[in-house]
Image (cartoon, rainbow, N blue to C red):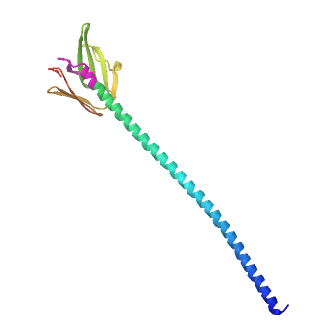
Amino acid sequence: MSYQDRQGERDVQFMDAVQGGLTSAIDRGAGRTGEYGRVFTALLFALFVITLLLAIMAGTRVYSALSDMRSQTDQDRLAMGLLVNSVRSSDAIDAVSVGAGPEGRSLVLTERLANGTYETRIYLYRGQVVEEYSVAGTPYTPDKATPVVATGTFDFTYSQGLLTIVTDEGRAEVALRSVRGGA
């Protein structure tokens, strides 16, 4: 073989070696890129899952707070409704009057039955509006009264057939059907 032929073979071998090295380097780089792609995908998935969990936790807290607020509002409305219904059920001539409760004025609803006269007394006692049912003229017994609503305020006014009851939870107005409410 001539010198040129040997030189041509060496050039071919060199080119094959360079090309083989580049190919293997590219293959190795492609492997790393594939690994980075899998790691990136896993991290992206984990971030998505964490975001969803945080959103679920926030949603649960918001729902819980709204549910608690609704329950409290329903309870307050129920308490005021109980007071209003007590007044309406006793609405008769001279049935509504003012009494002296242990901590201030009391709303007294008088009921005259065949076996005697009874009173439903609604008043403030130890931070609660309570309702006590007893024989007319007997002393107040707040320990036997039924709590209606927790509040620091209980007041009522009567004007032109309209009884207005005010507590911390709100205000309720009752139009008395009797001609003379008496309060």
Magenta highlight range: 84-100
Q: Quadrant of residue 183?
A: top left
User: Looking at the rendering, which quadrant does residue 114 occupy?
Assistant: top left
Asked whether residue 96 appears in the rendered view, the answer is yes
Give coordinates of residue 150: x percent, y percent. 34, 30
Residue at position x 25%, y 19% from top? 89
Q: Is residue 100 left or right of residue 149?
A: left
For residue 154, side relative to residue 147 (left or right): left
Q: For this view, does 72 lie left or right of residue 100?
A: right
Quarter in which the N terminus is drawn: bottom right
Q: Is residue 111 above or below residue 165?
A: above
Tell whether position 93 is magenta.
yes
Residue 162 in the image: x percent, y percent? Answer: 18, 27
Residue 127 seen in render: no
Total count of labels = 0
- Give the image location of residue 22, x and y in percent: 70, 76
